[in-house]
Amino acid sequence: MVPYRQGRTAAEDAFKLSSNENPYPPLPAVLEAIGASAINRYPEGSAARLRDLLGERYGVSAERLQVGAGSVSVLAQLITAAAASGDEVVFSWRSFEAYPLLVGTAGATPVMVPNTADHRHDLPAMLAAITDRTRLVIVCSPNNPTSTTVTNDEFVAFMAQVPPTVLVVLDEAYIEFVTDPDAVRGAALINDYPNLVVLRTFSKAYGLAGLRVGYAVGAEYVMDAARAVAIPLSVTEPAQRAAIASLEHEGELLERVAQLNRVRERIWEGIVAQGWDAPEPQGNFVWFPTGELTAQAAEVFAKHGIVARALIDGLRVSVGEAESVEKLLSASAEVVQMRRTAAATATLD
Ligand SMILES: *Cc1c(COP(=O)(O)O)cnc(C)c1O
């Protein structure tokens, strides 16, 4: 198995836009909350206060929530609980790099269904990929790394046909950044399907990536199964306190999200004007389908002071500081030139 590779670190003067992090520093209230933690003591293992608060927000009992050290941890619990050797887990590809790793370490088989030509989930094809071995389907909206969403209509039509014995995990790590009114929103659907689990995180919109805290909402017996396989006491006290303080100051944090979305809008307008055939971004990141020129394109971005995430067939660039936009757009313009030259050379060949 190939180990998980983290986004590259940046030189002093470069913008690190490789890990979809929030560029804003923590809120003073969050720092204060963390400072009050008694770190010589173990945390309260079930994150009871945080689950109570979240339960009020979702209108569900605290038993229907599971908090983990990042939503990736909760996803690992769900996969481990639901799938083992001989079982299959269906997800779209390309999607989040962690999915094949988590499925593989559970001993199960990843079934990767290609995205549509416009970089979206192909839900009918995912449905067709479900067999009697399928235990779980992961739907990522907005999808990392392509920044596209699944629509509510598509998702509801999909859920109507998924067997009720197959768990559907809707990974909404970037839901706070979604502006498309047609996009699916899991919070509105959690009471409609007992086999639906919605995953959310404090890492992205709430800027707590370094503290590791995320959660799932789903049926109580499914959350119980996740709890049964969880590593005890892995959600730290500072993380729980920071998450609670973030919910209490959500307005300020969502204002930052709105600011980041304005930066995203500037990037989007810029790259459309440059002629990019990129999907309209709905997460805090933009996907450049650079194909075979991806490694070279990453070099161009690096030269312009932008550390991007190079995947096999495209570059993912996070929406960061407003000051990064100019550099980003000059890099993407240079890549357009490079692609034209490469295409012209290919034609001559
Ligand atoms: C960043 C991300 C997560 C969240 O990870 P945490 O473990 O909560 O930090 C989950 N899913 C996707 C698709 C992501 O991109």
Image (cartoon, rainbow, N blue to C red):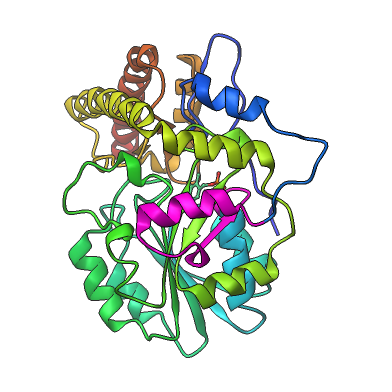
Taking depth in this image into account, of 261 and 40 the one nearest to the observer is: 40
Does residue 243 lie above or below 17 as drawn?
below
Residue stretch in magenta: 46-71
Can you say whether 10 is above or below 205 in the image?
above
In this view, which residue lies farthest toward the right?
40
Query: On the rendered image, what quadrant is the C terminus found in?
Result: top left
Asked if residue 70 is among those painted magenta in the image, a careful observer would answer yes
The answer to whether 165 is drawn above or below residue 63 in the figure is: below
Near-viewer residue (347 or 121): 121
Q: Residue at image x 83%, y 36%?
A: 40
Image-quadrant location for residue 169: bottom left
The x, y position of residue 170, in whole percent, is 40, 62
Evaluate whether residue 342 shows in this view: yes
Q: Percent x, y for residue 329?
A: 32, 19
Q: Residue, x 61% and y 62% (percent of image)?
A: 76
Image location (x, y in percent) of residue 156: 23, 71
Q: Which residue is drawn at 74% across and 59% down?
A: 232
Is residue 97 visible from the viewing direction of this image?
no
Q: Residue at x 34, y 76 (%)?
A: 193
Q: In which quarter of the image is residue 250?
A: top left
